[in-house]
Image: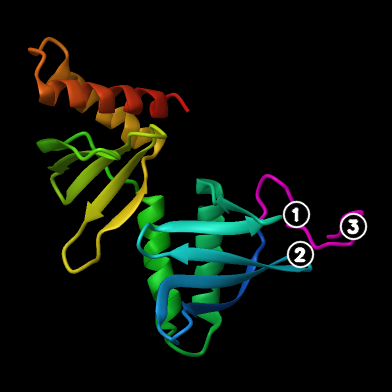
């Protein structure tokens, strides 16, 4: 697709990846030839090839549009996962890199249930407020950016590096329910005041 300036632009439609074909999956190397922590998926969408970046540390899937980085929506991720499964079925070898990306897609599409989240500690670290805790299945930290007010999760799983990613709407709803019990009707202490700030951020996220 071309614009009036004859520059390639990513087709803007509700489900741009619904008929995408994965051409290749490759690790991104740094200037020293070492793995940078990112993978790139080259996806053919119509007649246009676009690149999706998977950042292992955060679990994010991003695409660059007009020099702006955009994180993929849940619908995009579902369609991309289908395209990647087709790719894995068609390649005549065991593509370990594609397998790592598929694990990342599955993690992104299966949000952490925070209804069983138990708070262990709350820390004011200046730039962030850190609420350390765990669910029935994993250890995780809730991180509030004190400047932007954005919430993220730092998920720690056995035999895997910790991954930091944004809090989903459902996770925010769960967090509101859990933290409300720890804040409302409780004496005003340093801990409850910090939890109240995180609770308010979770309420805002649950509405978006």
Disc 1 to disc 2, how far (Cα)? 9 Å
| For marks 1 and 3 on the same chain, the one whose residue lies earlier in the sequence | 3
Q: Secondary structure at mark 1?
A: loop
Residue ID for mark 2: 46
Residue occupying image coordinates x 48% and y 82%: 31
Q: Are marks 1 and 3 in contact (CB under 8 Å)?
A: no
> Can you name the residue that lies furthest to the top here?
185
Labels 1 and 2 touching (C-beta < 8 A): yes
| Residue 67, horizontal then vertical, whole percent | 67, 57
Would residue 105 be visible to someone looking at this image? yes
Measured in 3D between alpha carbons, the distance from the residue under mark 3 to the one under mark 2, in whole angstroms, is 20 Å
What residue does disc 1 label?
11
Residue 16 lies, with reference to residue 115, above or below; the image says: below
Which residue in the rendered view is the most extreme toward the bottom? 92
Of labels 3 and 2, earlier in sequence is: 3
Q: Are marks 3 and 2 in contact (CB under 8 Å)?
A: no
* Residue 49 as seen in the image, left or right of residue 152: right
Residue 91 horizontal/vertical position (percent):
53, 85
Q: Nearer the viewer, mark 3 or mark 2?
A: 3
Cα distance, mark 1 to mark 3?
15 Å
**Residue 95 in picture, x, y percent from top left:** 44, 83
Of residue 164 and residue 116, the one placed in the foreground of this image is 164
- For image coordinates 29% across by 45% down, the residue present is 153
Residue 176 visible to an observer of this rendering: no
* Residue situated in front as seen by the camera: 26 or 38: 38
Identify the residue under disc 3.
5
Range shown magenta: 1-16
Is 2 left or right of 13, judged from the image as shown? Answer: right
The residue depicted at 83 percent of the width and 62 percent of the height is 7
Q: Reading the chain from its start, which is encountered first: label 1 or label 2?
A: 1
Query: Relative to 90, is 194 above or below?
Result: above
């Amino acid at each position: 697709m071309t614009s009036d300036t004859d520059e390639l632009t990513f087709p803007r439609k509700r489900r741009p990846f619904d008929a995408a074909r994965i051409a290749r999956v490759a690790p991104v190397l740094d200037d020293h030839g070492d793995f940078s922590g990112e993978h790139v998926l080259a996806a053919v969408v119509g007649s246009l090839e676009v690149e999706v970046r998977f950042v292992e540390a955060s679990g994010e899937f991003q695409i660059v549009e007009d020099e702006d980085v955009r994180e993929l929506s849940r619908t995009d991720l579902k369609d991309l996962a289908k395209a990647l499964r087709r790719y894995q079925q068609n390649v005549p070898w065991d593509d370990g890199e594609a397998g790592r990306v598929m694990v990342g897609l599955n993690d992104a599409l299966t949000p952490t249930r925070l209804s069983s989240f138990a708070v262990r500690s709350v820390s004011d670290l200046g730039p962030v407020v850190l609420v350390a805790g765990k669910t029935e299945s994993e250890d995780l930290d809730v991180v509030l950016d004190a400047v932007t007010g954005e919430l993220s999760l730092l998920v720690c799983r056995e035999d895997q590096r910790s991954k930091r990613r944004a809090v989903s709407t459902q996770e925010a709803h769960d967090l509101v329910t859990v933290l409300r019990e720890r804040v409302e009707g409780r004496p005003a202490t340093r801990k409850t005041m910090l939890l109240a700030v995180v609770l308010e951020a979770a309420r805002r996220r649950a509405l978006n």
